[in-house]
Image: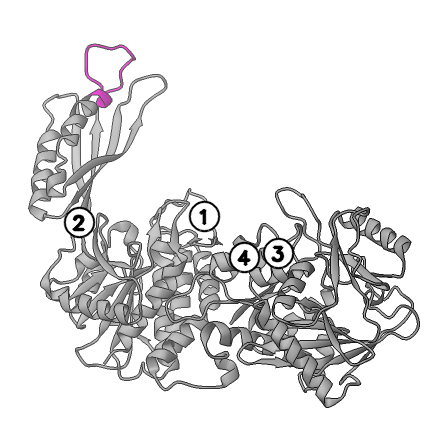
Amino acid sequence: MKIAIIYNRDSQAVINLFGKQNREKYGLQTINRIKNALKAQGHQVQAFEGDKNIIRKLEEFMPSVISGERPGLVFNLSYGIQGRARYTHIPSILEMLGIPYVGSGPESHGIALDKVVTKMILIQKGLPTPKFAVLEKPDDPLDEALSYPMIVKPRDEAVSFGLKVVRNEQELREGVKFIYDTFNGPTLVEEFIEGMEVNVGLLGNQPVEALPPVELQFGEGEQIYTYEDKTKQSGRTVQHVCPANLSPEQSEQVQKLAIDAFKAIGLFDSARVDFRIDKEGNPYILEINSLASLGLGGSYVYAANYVGLDYDKLVNRLVDVASQRYFGTPLASQLQTRTRDKRQAVFTYLTKNRDKIEEELKLWTNISSRTEDAVGLSTIVRKLDERLQKIGLHLSDELSNRRSVWTWETEEQKKEGTLLVFPIDIPIERRVYPVPFRKDPEWLHGEGIASSRAGIITVLYALSALKIIKKLKGKKIGVLAYSDEGRGMRYSNTYLQMAASNYEQVLVMNPGIYQGKVVDQRRGSRKYKVVIDGSSMRVGSKVKKDVMSWFMERYDQISQLNRPEDKLSVAVLDIHSDRYSILLSHRLQANIYVNYLNSKHADLVEKRLKEIFVVQDKEIHSNLEKLEERAPLIRNRSTKKLIEQLKSISEEWQLPFGVDSSLLPSAAGVVPTKTPVLCGLAPASKDIYTPDEAIHRGELLQRLLLLTLYLLKD
C-alpha cells in the first residue's frame, strides 16, 4: 500500500501567513522512525509537509484508483501551519480528496483542540472534569466558585504551552496576561487537582482498546508536566511508570472514563486522555489529545511497549485499525491471506505494480525511435525481444522480415488466439527536439507515449501477469510490432495480413478514446504529392503565369472536394516552393491528404485531382503521385462478439467502456475483413504527434486490467 506521512515542521508554504501560528513540531527522527517502520512492512512510503502544495504531491504519489483497488492512505502527523483550528486542515483536505487517513476527523480534532468545548461535552456526558472558567482578557472578573490553587492554560493550544499553577490573584492575573499577550486568545482557568497525573492511551475503534495507565512522576518542583519538561529544558527528568501505581479497580475506572471521553467527542483510531487523581482517589479528565505524540519519550509509546507493541508494531497497528475502519478488514499483508481466484491474482499483481509500470513506461518513452532513426528503432526491437523472450514468446521467422516488422508468438499452434499489434516508430521529423517523459496528476506526457509506448507497456505487463499466475502456457498469443507507421505501413501491411489470418481476433494497441472507449471504425487515408515546374520570372511580370499563382487557382477547387456528410475530407498539408534570389518561384511541391470512409468516394477524389492538375500551359509542368494509402476500418458484425466480451468484463470489474469511431487510420484497416478486429485498446490520449502528447494516467491501469482479463478468459 502507498502511505503518505504528512507532517508540519519547516514549511510555511501558504498564500499568506495570517493569524495564529503553529508552535508544535514533530522531530525528523520520529518522522524517519515511522517511515522506516512502514517500509519494513512492505509499504511504499513518502513524507510530505502539510502545506498548500499537498494536493498536487498526493495526486502524483497516489493517483485515483480503479474499482476494487484499495486507495493509498495518509499517516497524519499534521499539526497545521496556522489558525485556531489548524489540526483540522489536513483531515479536511483529505476528506475532500477522498483519501483515507490514520486518525480522527476534522470535527473531532476541532473539538479536542478547544479545551473549553471539550469540557462542556464531558460535563454534558456526566464525565468528571475540574471546575473551570474562561477569561477573555486579563482583567475579566473570575467566578467566585473557583478556589485556589488554580491552573491557567491557553484555550486552544497543546504541548503545555502557557501552562502554570497560580495560588493567588496576582499570579492569576500575571498568568492570564502572559497567555493573552503571547497567544492572543482567551485563557482557561480551572481548579488545580492536587495528586497524581495519569495518561491513558487509546487504540482502535470497535472496540476501543485502552492501554495501561501511565503515571507521570515529576520529582521536585511544580507537580505538572510543563512545556520545559517536554522539551528537556526544565533541568529535571519526568519519569514514566507503567502500569501506574493504582489499584486494579482504579486502573479499570480511568480506562473506562478514557474510552467514554474518546467516544463522547467522536475520535477515531488513537488518542490520549490526561487525568489528575486527587488524594481521595477521584479521577478528573484534564484534556483529550486527539493527536497523541508518537515520540519515543511519550507516554503513548511507553504504554504500547508495555503491552508488547514495540515501535514498529505500534505504527503498523495504527495503519491496520484505520484500514479496518475504512475497508472493513485490516491490510491483506497483515492477514496473510491468498486468493485462488486467478482474476483477483491478476488484479493484485497489476495494482501492486502501478508505480513500476509507470517507471518502465518512462524508460521506454525516453528512448527516441522516430521513423527515420535506425539506431533508436534497433534499440526498441532489442529491448522488446529480450522482454518477450523472457516472458515466453519467440520470434517467428515466417511472420517477420526483421526490418520493418517483427512477430513473437507463444508455442501454442492452434488456430484460436489473439494477435496484439502496435507500432514502434514515431512519425515525427528528426529535426524536432525530443520531448522527455513527464508526469502530472492526471496525464503522463512524452514523445510517442500515446502513439506507441503505452501500447507496448500494456502488452508487456498483460503477458507478464498471465505468466505470474501460470496462465500463459497453453494460450496462443502473438505480438506484432512494426516500424513503418510513418511510411503508411508500406512494408509491414502484407505481414500483418498474413499474421492476422492465423488468429481468431486482432487487437490493435493504438490509443483509445477518453472514458474507456475502444474504436471499431476508422477512416482511411491517401496522401498525394504534386510537383509543379515552371519558369523563373521577375516580380511583376505579366507575360507568363508563375507556378504559385497557377497552384493557388486550383487550391479552391481542392477545398471544394470536401464532403462532410459523406465523411470525406480533403486538405493541402504542406506547400514548399523553390526560387532564385528575388525571382518568383519556379518550382512548387505540395502534399494533399484525403481522409475517407468509403473507398469509392476516395477514388472519385483521386480522379478529380488528376483532372485539376492537367496542364494546358506549355510553360507549366505538373506531376501528381500517390505516396501512401491506408485502408479504413469498417464497422461490421464480426466484431460484435469481441465487443460484448470486453463490455461484460468491464461491467463486472466496473471499468469504463464504450465504442466510438476515429478520424485517423491505423493498422486495424489492414486486417482482413473476416477477422474480428478492434482498435484503441491502449489508454486514451490527447495531442497525439505533438510536443504535448499524453495518455490518461488512470486509464493506463484500467486498459491493462481489461486486456489481461480478456486474454485470461477460456
Report the Cα–Cα distance between label 3 and label 1.
Answer: 36 Å
Please provide the residue range marked out in magenta.
Answer: 535-549
User: Which of disc 1 and disc 3 is earlier in sequence?
Assistant: 3
Question: In what element is the residue under mark 3?
Answer: loop
* Residue 295: quarter of image: bottom right
Q: Is residue 242 above or below residue 298?
A: below
Question: In what element is the residue under mark 1?
Answer: loop
Colour theme: one colour
Residue 635 locus on image (x, y percent): 13, 57
Name the residue rendered at 74%, 51% in the picture: 186
User: Which of disc 2 and disc 4 is earlier in sequence?
Assistant: 4
Report the Cα–Cα distance between label 1 and label 2.
Answer: 28 Å
Name the foreground residue: 225 vs 532: 225
- Is residue 316 shown to the viewer in this render? no
Q: Which residue is mark 4?
A: 92
Residue type, numbered disc 4: Ser
Residues at discs 3 and 2 in contact (Cβ within 8 Å): no
Q: Which residue is mark 3?
A: 50
